[in-house]
Image (cartoon, coloured by chain):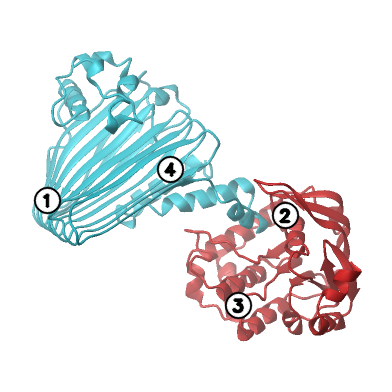
Amino acid sequence: MQLADLPSRRSEAWKWSDLRAAMAGQEGVVTGTAPIDAEGPISALAQAMDDAYGPSALDIVAPGETFETRITEGDAAQYGSVIVRAGATATLVERAGVSGSRLRPFLPSFSRIEVEPGATLHRIVVQTNDVGTGQADAAIVLNEAVVKLGQGATFRQFVLGEGAKLARIEISVDAVEGAQVELNGVYLASAKRHIDMTSRVAHRGPGIQSRQLVRGVARKGGRGVFQGKFLVERAGQKTDAEMAHNALLLEEGAEVFSKPELEIYADDVACAHGNTAGQLDEDAVFYLRQRGIPDVEARALITRAFVMEAVPEWVGVDLYAEIEQRIDTWLGTRA
Amino acid sequence: MLELNNLHARVVPEDGAAREILKGLSLAVPAGEVHAIMGPNGSGKSTLSYVLTGKHGYEVTGGSATFEGQDLLTLEPEARAALGLFLSFQYPIEIAGVPVMTFVRTAMNAQRKTRGEPEVSAPDFLKLSKIAAAKLRIDPEMLKRPLNVGFSGGEKKRLEIYQMLMIEPRFMILDETDSGLDIDALKVVAEGVNALRGPTRGMLVITHYQRLLDYIKPDRVHVLSAGRIVKSGGPELALELEKSGYDQFLKAG
């Protein structure tokens, strides 16, 4: 593979996240990678890195417990598969953290997930980036999951994304009869951070319920990208789907790009989507200040409440507190 | 306590030309008194409440406003609040994701911090909240819900007074608190407001109608017209206005 084989802004799916431009300087990785196949560029890159740096961390067959994987700092990768057996329940926590000493951290991850009939998988992706370190600015984080759901299976996902030079958390879900899907996320884009949340849910059978709520905030020089697609095939009768993406641009010079898409071929469905990007409501800020809450705290309080609405309780007490803490730190309300 | 002297102010919309609303307003509310401001739509009643509390988009172009001798106009809204200024909003704002009690406790502690006082303890806060809610006949469950989200107009007004009872401000501005209230709710709200009357507190009751003043009895009544006080008197002035309308004063103004 050559740099020129990677998708650039000319490719529709990557138009706001120019992978080719971002990977300049990582030629060593790129040229050592096999050609891009049908699974796409993230798969190819993660596989190459995984082969180079050790065994895959994700070849697990869940008997009903919590698995945690972690890729941090320097060059590390994941390439593997997860199968949750029929009727089982499992939780998968994936961490991609940038804070270490490597010059140009590159953290690709690709997973193929199968949730068998009646099984439940909760997946939590925590992509952190400790602001203030030079290498954090140069990091590239790619995480893609391809999920196949059996009949009546449940898949819930929550992603926290703090961005990097380029960070893309991508998911594609294939759902059949009676499946339940939840894809929530929060992104926090500060200066020099790019965070892309791309998703696609294919409703291939009847009676599927899907919910998506992504909330994002961006500061000056930060960029958020949301691309969400719900495809309802002819067989997807009685689909009940709701997609929402709401972003707050906290400062002049913040950027958010979004593309919500519904593609529906069944005639008896309930599909809704909402997409907003705006600024903090100054009347609300004034209301809080009139009650004695200082300006900075008033803004943080409203912003925090706005993003926390997308954090589900099912992540569990510990992770909920951790996510809350990351958000507060980002907003500057906790040291 | 509150003294306004020849106050001029304009509203500066984000898009559009500035308009002068207050044109030389003078008013003094001594401690212990309740003054009513009455006037027709567009006379500057709400502008006055926003100018005093420091809302963005309102610009003072002349005159002065002092609270216990201190210049209010140079202070940030939160500093005015910490001094003891409280506005019961005509249209209370909805804040998604912030439960009423969390919000009120944050506000109380922020004010205390500014004044160098210790935070309110959790048991004390709950005790105060219980008393205030009972006084205003507010369902305690409502206080766990996000502030004003999905509340009726009357519930929002009750919650304004609940916040007032909790914060115990020294000077209260009630902006059209009677709008959206039926007669029973009005009585409950007025009882709550009256509970805060006292020799060290002052109050400005802004209203379009005399009705509220049956329950919150003012010491003085002022008629605001075209940005100025055109007539002042005792409580009987409110009754006179109810009978013969504002027209007589508009001509005079």
Q: Chain of mark 4?
A: A
* Residue with the mark numbered 2: B115
Amino acid type, residue under disc 1 in the picture = Pro
Residue drawn at x 73%, y 83% as measured from the top left: B215
Can residue B238 be seen in the rendering of this structure?
A: yes
Query: What SS does tag 1 mark?
Result: loop
Q: Chain of mark 2?
A: B
Query: What SS does tag 3 mark?
Result: helix
Chain coloured red in this rendering: B
Query: What SS does tag 4 mark?
Result: helix
* Residue with the mark numbered 4: A326
* Residue with the mark numbered 1: A63
Distance (Cα) linking label 3 and label 4: 37 Å
Amino acid type, residue under disc 2 in the picture = Arg
1 and 4 marks on the same chain = yes
Q: Is residue B253 left or right of residue A226?
A: right
**Discs 2, 1 touching: Cβ within 8 Å:** no
Q: At which x and y percent is residue A270?
A: 26, 60
What color is chain A drawn in?
A: cyan
* Residue with the mark numbered 3: B131
Q: Is residue A2 left or right of residue B239?
A: left
